[in-house]
Amino acid sequence: MTWGTLMSRAHGMCEFCGGMDDCLPVEVDGVGEILLCAICESDPPAEHWRCLETAAQSEHPEVQVAVWRKLAEIGEPWAEDLRGRMRLAPETQALL
């Protein structure tokens, strides 16, 4: 995906938290690229990841897969609950 296409799809914002500072493309293995800010690319406190509650509703399979994988890493009850509530299209499930 080109930089311009990615920026357009993400409206220039981090596709996890909506932040607009220092956003860069990040490869999601086997799926494609998403746009993430420096905070989401670093090691923020677990509470920061509550932003994934909104990101989980993304219509873009790349973002959905990235959210699914990140939620598995968090290890908090709310993250496990959110992961259980995510509804993914069969095509997206095949990418997990």
Image (cartoon, rainbow, N blue to C red):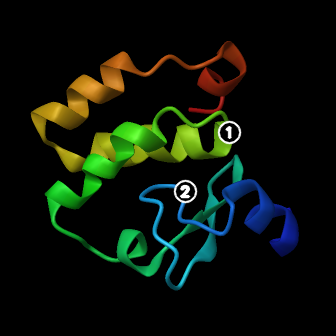
Q: Which residue is at 55% across, 56% downward? A: 15
- Mark 1 or mark 2: whose residue is earlier in sequence: 2
Query: Which of the two residues, 95 or 37, is positioned nearer the viewer here?
Result: 37
**Kind of residue indicated by mark 2:** Glu
Among the 4 quarters of the image, the one containing residue 76: top left
Among the 4 quarters of the image, the one containing residue 61: top right
Question: On screen, 61 above or below 19?
Answer: above
- Side of 23 relative to 49 (left or right): right
- Side of 12 relative to 79 (left or right): right
- Circle 1/circle 2 CB separation < 8 Å: yes
Query: Which of the two residues, 52 or 27, is positioned nearer the viewer here?
Result: 52
- Side of 64 relative to 39 (left or right): right
Which residue position is annotated with label 1? Answer: 60
Which residue position is annotated with label 2? Answer: 15
**Kind of residue indicated by mark 1:** His
Q: Circle 2: is it few (<14), some (14-19), or many (20+) Cα within 10 Å?
A: many
Q: Is residue 33 visible?
A: no
Q: Quadrant of the C terminus?
A: top right
Question: On screen, 25 above or below 71?
Answer: below
